[in-house]
Image: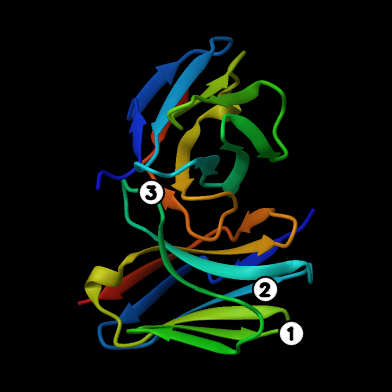
Amino acid sequence: QQQVKQSPQSLIVQKGGISIINCAYENTAFDYFPWYQQFPGKGPALLIAIRPDVSEKKEGRFTISFNKSAKQFSLHIMDSQPGDSATYFCAAISRDDKIIFGKGTRLHILP
Amino acid sequence: KAGVTQTPRYLIKTRGQQVTLSCSPISGHRSVSWYQQTPGQGLQFLFEYFSETQRNKGNFPGRFSGRQFSNSRSEMNVSTLELGDSALYLCASSLMTGYEKLFFGSGTQLSVL
């Protein structure tokens, strides 16, 4: 079974700090890697995504770093704010249209 | 533009019953996909429908089925409910096929007693 391993399960960061969530995949057939943010009682919302032909993508305070050789990618949240407290999911989509999600990271930003 | 609407929001059923969940996609979106979310397994893909045809299916038993209507609205059915089917069921819509830009609804929380 194709897997995407996400870590840590939970993370506590001080306001203004950098939050880092990591994902690792096994199958090289994956070619699109989105991150989703989910607040309690809501569905996930697409945050940012990357393809393996670039090593980094930045949108505002959110950055994806991608290491193709290590088959790892990570989400960095700069200047983390209490409003960023949510569960974050990484995902991987393969060329034959399979989507696999990581198990999620519960992020809490201390005020 | 209205978002993805899922009904009902909460549902309580007993083992052995069947249940139907409904999803109305964003206007103009033709693809609807369904996901099961549980604390233990996280988010898992169930199936995708496009133009009333099932285009893709995840690794779930045949008790889980779905359909899509000509207006792109979709329903998901689970027959012979088991305790382990308790989960948040999410649907997502997108303009075309695939999963690169999914818009999720808030889900239906199903509890099986």
Badge 2 crowding class, 10 Å Cα cut-off, few under 14, some 14 to 19, many 20 or more, is many
Name the chain under label 2.
A
Horizontal relation, residue A42 to residue B33: left or right: left
Residue nearer the viewer, B65 or A25 = B65
Point out the tag, 3 or 2, that comes first from the N-terminus.
2
- The residue tagged 3 is A43
- Label 3 vs label 2, nearer the camera: 3
Residue drawn at x 60%, y 20% is B82
- Mark 1 surroundings within 10 Å by alpha-carbon count, few (fewer than 14), some (14 through 19), many (20 or more): few
Q: Is residue B96 above or below residue A60?
A: above
* Residue type, numbered disc 2: Ala
Q: CA distance from mark 1 to mark 3?
A: 30 Å
Q: Residue at x 49, y 24 (%)?
A: B69
Residue A74 on image: x %, y %: 55, 80
Residue positioned most to the top:
B17
Describe the element under mark 2 as helix, strand or loop: strand
The mark that comes first in sequence, 2 or 1, is: 2
For marks 1 and 3, the one nearer the N-term is 3
Q: Chain of mark 3?
A: A
Q: Tag 3, which secondary structure?
A: loop
In percent of width and height, residue A93 lies at 65, 61
The amino acid sitting under disc 3 is Gly
Q: Quadrant of residue A90?
A: bottom right
The residue that mark 2 highlights is A24
Q: Is residue B113 visible?
A: no
Q: Where is B13 relative to B59, above or below?
A: above
Find disc 1 in the rendering and name its residue. Answer: A70
* Camera-nearest residue between B50 and B93: B50
